[in-house]
Image (spheres, coloured by chain):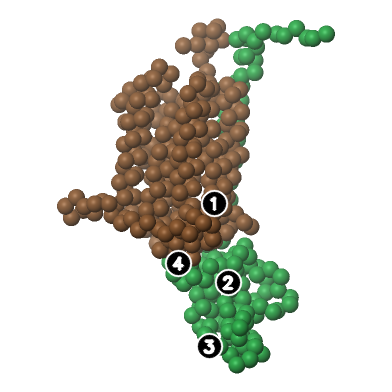
Chain colours: A brown, B green
Amino acid sequence: MLSYPHINPVGFHIGPLPIHWYGLLEIISFVVGTLWLIRRGRRREWQWTKDEVLDLEYYLSIGAIVGGRVGYVLWYDLPYYLGHAIQIFEVWDGGMSFHGGLIGVILGCWVYGRKHSRSTMAILDFVAPAAPIGLGLGRLANFINDQLFGRVSHLPWAIVFPAGGPQPRQPSQIYEFLLEGVLLLVILILYGRKPRPTGAVGSLFVLCYGLFRFLVEYTRQPDIQLGFVLGHLDMGQVLSIPMILIGPALLYWAYRGGFEAHYPQAREGTRP
Amino acid sequence: MTKPSIPETSTTRRDTTPSPEATRLFTRLVIGFAVLYGLWAVVLSFRIVVQQQAVRQHLAFALRKCPRRTFPTPTAAWAVAQDFVTRLNAAFPTKPCGTGAAFAVARSPHIRVHNCQIVISVKHRRLHVQGYDTQGHLMDNIFERLNPPPRRL
């Protein structure tokens, strides 16, 4: 059994303002992700200017925050929020759903694509490899914040989380950091090194995230207000099932060329 | 005899590429599936939260009111357990999900599934409380004591 490394959730103070690790890690992931996308956008196959990337980030951030919150309210605690509607806007009190955030990001890509004549799937391909940076650091922040820990376990590396009572628990945040952060980043970088059909990288993200999340949830303590929701499955797993089903379907369609931009000239072999 | 291989040209490749109409239909199917699934998940979640909230309140109440002493004999402990369950069922007559009573003694022979039920048992002449969630999984008393309802995480 390992002991929990009591890390103060407040990293440091700027004057009277406490800077929490959670917020700091989110900002770091946002900055690193943006810088990486700017660098990635310079490559010949992408051709995104710095201003375009920053503009896109605006849509993605709005989509992730609004989608994440709406997803949490709808899928994790709707009866509570129906009685406390004003608290839906109190995002600083916690409660975000990855699956809702993903839908928000996809909608953000779609709106941006409509405005700037870019394909939604091509935008998703461009941004998908940067997502694991935020996801991974977010899980580390969960660990530091002593939240979203695992189920009771007696494995040698189980940890007693102060907020989880005296029993040792699975450090599921670390598993999630390793799978949804590190491994997913490596997979997407390696896969994206060669030119792939439009939509393939984004589809692979959907498939891999769904799979990793589904597996890790077996070690994670279900949300207390829900418990298990469908036999042995918790809500995170229920919401990951469509990702595991849709991901391969999107990959198949991408490899058939279904998401390639259709230009009238292409029939004559003069696709730009 | 081996078949002569047909060299892949831009023409043969184009034939297998879905048309824009096919892609539009595919996209609509995927979005339709995701929307319907998402709505089903909302309904499922709503039902489970309401039921689980009731179970958690039952468990919290039983944990708070459960006699803590050691009884002189197992028979005396079982008698107190039975009386405790009767009083609990009178206070909370509705079981949040499934059939049967909201509270039961452990040795009730007719109980096979425990979902949404609080079970009182006797171990070493003492009463023990066990809660089962909406899916019949044993709930964590320590975790529930740390986060009594209506607290959420």
A157 above or below B11? below
| Residue B123 rendering spot, x and y as whole percentages | 61, 81
Residues at discs 2 and 4 both on one chain: no
Q: Name the residue under label 3.
A: B69
Q: Mark 4 points at which residue?
A: A165
- Asked whether disc 3 touches disc 4, contact meaning CB atoms under 8 Å apart, the reply is no
Secondary structure of the residue carrying tag 1 is: helix
| Residue type (three-letter) at the residue carrying disc 2 | Gly
- Protein chain holding label 2: B
| Residue type (three-letter) at the residue carrying disc 1 | Glu
Residue A36's image quarter? Answer: top left
- Which of label 3 and label 2 is nearer to you? 3
Q: How far apart are marks 3 and 4 (CA)?
A: 24 Å
Residue at 64% in and 76% down: B101
> Which disc is residue A217 wearing?
1
Residue B12's image quarter? Answer: top right
Secondary structure of the residue carrying tag 4 is: loop
Q: Name the residue under label 2.
A: B131
Residue A20 or A74: which is nearer the viewer?
A20
Does residue B138 appear anywhere in the picture?
yes
